[in-house]
Image (cartoon, grey):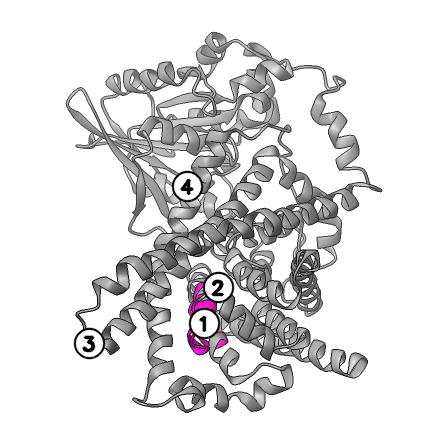
Amino acid sequence: MIVASSASSIQTKNKIPRIVFIGQPNTGKSTFFNTVTKSNAGVANWPGLTVDFMQANLDYNGKTYEFVDLPGIYDLEGFTEDELVVQKFLENYNFDLIVCVINASQIDRQILMPLQVQRLGLPCVLMLNMADEVKRFGVKINTKELSETLNMPVFTISAKYGSGCVLAIQGIWDKLQTIDDSYKCSDIATFFRDNKVTDNDMDEVTRIGVEMPSEDVTTFSNRLDSILLNRVVGLPIFFVSMLAVFLAIWFVGMPLQDPVGNFTDWLQGAVIEPSLSFLPEGFSAFIINGPYAGFAALLGFVPLVAFFFVVMTALEDSGYLSRAAYLMDALMRSAGLDGRGFVLQLFGFGCNVPAIMGTRTIRSKTQRLLSILIIPFALCSARLQVFVFFLGIILPGIAGGFALWLLYIISFVVAFVLAMIFNLSGQFKSKDPFVIELPPYRTPTFKQVALNVWSEMTTFVRNLAIFMIIGTCITWYLTNYPGGAEGMNTYAGRIGTFFQPLMAPLGINPLLTVSLIIGFVAKEVQLAAVATMYGLGEGSDALKTTLGGVITFRQGFSYCLFSLLYVPCLTTVATIWGETKSARFTIFSVTVSMVVAWVVAFSFYQSWGLIFG
């Protein structure tokens, strides 16, 4: 029988029993959640809460159950936004069972959350994940004794490899059959101020059922860390590693686009154009150069972006990105940030949107706002395709690969310098300590990398398909109207001409200016806009030849710099507003990026002219 504490109360039984998953970040909680729900979960919005959760309904013995995966948190009495969201969920919604997932190899520290759940008097099943690592690190856990001490069922699992999961899932179903009530919490933070789980409480539990290895034992991770975290060679190794990653993207990811481009060209010539031949010429031209061009452009960049996520996921799963945060912490401190800010900046290289959302884990509000302000300068995967295309024209060969790496360095330097400037203003100062869990080094599995890349790519395509199609349709309209107009007499040409006093000092002509304006919607449509403005197929040899004849290295690199630093896309802007709930901060962020982009591109273009003529 479960006895609720003063911070929890028994409620009328839910018609659909609700099972809530909680745990620290990087414990494999969501992996196990996907195993339980058979990856049938979908994003759900909960009234009164600011974030969406993964949710799934499952049937068992003719009855429906609801499973909810809450954000990863370190402490139930914490005060970060994610921790407050979890508290608010437990305080606002009735639930029937908590499934707490912890990293078994770090049970001496992660036992905190099961003890907090026990102290709240809530029904719980404890999952000791990463059982494979437990054996490797010499951790011994007597699950029977631990279960008796905590008064909750305990299972050892490896969500990564699936071992123990069948038994654990049956344990959840069995536990549910013994629960007659639903529960709700009240004022969790206040309760734990008077009923805190202490280090002694944690030691007492682990002394009974857990045997940790000696701290003097040298593991493979210890030996590797002695090199990769070395004060002298650690940072050089990191930067060389990043260079290798970007060269791999250049030499492996870029060629992957060619087969897709050949396919969309064939599809247009062999299927689309003959199928539309019965339509008026203007209408068929609109379909081919508008919606289809947007679809083809999006499809063309899928292999490149997917390869990028393969590399980043493998790095993240290996545990090296956490080391990167540790290595960069001292440097980031001088800019008013910490190692987490650097990691989120790295995630921004994939996509700015999740990186901005990831700032919820930063406890300090000022550090969080500062991180949100600089993340949009990270060279996201959408911008990557623009640079790959333009650098291929102005710097063919290996020089293009180094230039791409240089753009990544510039994006980081600009973000770092701006953070220093804003930090000096005193508006973003924080004294919070930096705490990060360094996981053991792991070999990324094909299954985990594939699942993550699939998830990222489906989101990439789903979120951007509409933007791409609308963007290319707008571009087609601006470049074909008013009727009978051509070149600079079209609406696009007039817009580009209007902004020439501002853009000419950067070496950016009216046609490329229009592509930058269209790129404000999404960088994925920027190249489609360039192709449409020049009246040639996107990515075609004719377009490359034409651009190679009209822009110099000086102009092309200035264009890349402006594209690198100005507003990433409307989705990012909307995310900044959504996370800060401040129109004023959002406008400030957009203004900063536009001013910085213009100043940097202007400085490069004019300086190059003065030095090299």
Ranked by sequence position, the earlier of labels 3 and 1 is: 3
* Viewport quadrant of the N terminus: top left
Percent across and percent down for residue 317 are 56, 35
Q: Residues within 10 Å of mark 1 (few under 14, many from 20)?
A: many
Q: Amino acid at mark 3?
A: Pro
Q: Measure how far apart labels 4 and 2 are at the Cα level.
A: 25 Å
Query: What element does badge 1 sit on?
Result: helix
User: Where 49 sits versus 568, above or below?
Assistant: above
The residue at 56%/22% (across/down) is 107
Q: Measure how far apart labels 1 and 2 are at the Cα level.
A: 8 Å
Q: Residues within 10 Å of mark 2 (few under 14, many from 20)?
A: some
The residue at 35%/50% (across/down) is 49
Query: What element does badge 3 sit on?
Result: loop
Q: Dividing the picture into quarters, in which one does residue 220 lie?
A: top right
Percent across and percent down for residue 269 are 32, 61
Q: Which residue is mark 3?
A: 280
Q: Main secondary structure of the magenta part?
A: helix
Most extreme residue toward the left is: 62
Task: Determine which of the numbered discs, if any, sits on residue 33 in the image.
Answer: none
* 130 or 80: nearer the viewer: 130
Q: Which residue is mark 4?
A: 454
Q: Measure how far apart labels 1 and 4 are at the Cα level.
A: 29 Å
Ranked by sequence position, the earlier of labels 1 and 4 is: 4
In this rendering, position of residue 13 left or right of residue 477: left
Segment tinted magenta in the rendering: 516-537
Contact (CB < 8 A) between labels 1 and 2?
Answer: yes
Q: Amino acid at mark 4?
A: Trp
Q: Which residue is mark 2?
A: 539
In this rendering, position of residue 100 left or right of residue 596: left
Q: Which residue is mark 1?
A: 531
